[in-house]
Image (cartoon, rainbow, N blue to C red):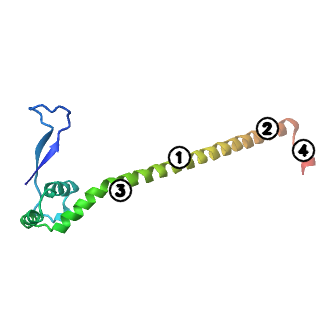
Amino acid sequence: MLLILAETKSGDTTAACPPFRLIELHLRVESRPDNWSSEEKFCIVLETAPMTEAELSEYCRKHGLYPEQIEAWKVACMSANAESDEQSKRSQKTSKAEKKRIKKLETELRRKEKALAETAALLTLSKKAEAIWGHNDEDE
């Protein structure tokens, strides 16, 4: 079991509702640490952050971990925001390009619809003219 401090959601920081609360996280000891959720790994990174090297080694032995695993998780946690920002910028750029492409396709579709409507109107007029004046042999 791992106890961590978590920030409360409300802005009320009275004695009855402190700004942080203790939450329990039960680590799945039966599963491998690499299969743990990102929340569990993050909690371990938070718990081990203030520890000295000796304390960290003892903690790792107790929980069946390696210090390198915790360091890798720490690096992953720290780089998560940078990757998220990068991904957000890429998705905005992609979104902008897609909107531009959609606008171009819609413009082309309107142009083709107008051309189709004009062709249909000309065909209808030619049929009406043929019905009124008959088939013109000079055209052949």
Going by the numbered disc 1, the residue's amino acid type is: Lys
Please rate how many residues cluster around mark 4, counting C-alpha atoms within 10 Å: few if below 14, some from 14 to 19, many from 20: few
Residue tagged 4: 136
Residue tagged 2: 125
* Kind of element beneath mark 1: helix
Going by the numbered disc 3, the residue's amino acid type is: Glu
Which numbered tag is attached to residue 83? 3
* Disc 1 from disc 2: Cα separation: 39 Å
**56 shown above or below 117:** below
Going by the numbered disc 4, the residue's amino acid type is: Asn
Please rate how many residues cluster around mark 1, counting C-alpha atoms within 10 Å: few if below 14, some from 14 to 19, many from 20: few
Residue tagged 1: 99
* Disc 4 from disc 3: Cα separation: 73 Å
- The reply to whether residue 80 is visible in this rendering is yes
Is 80 or 94 nearer to us in this picture?
80
Q: Residue at x 26, y 61 (%)?
A: 75
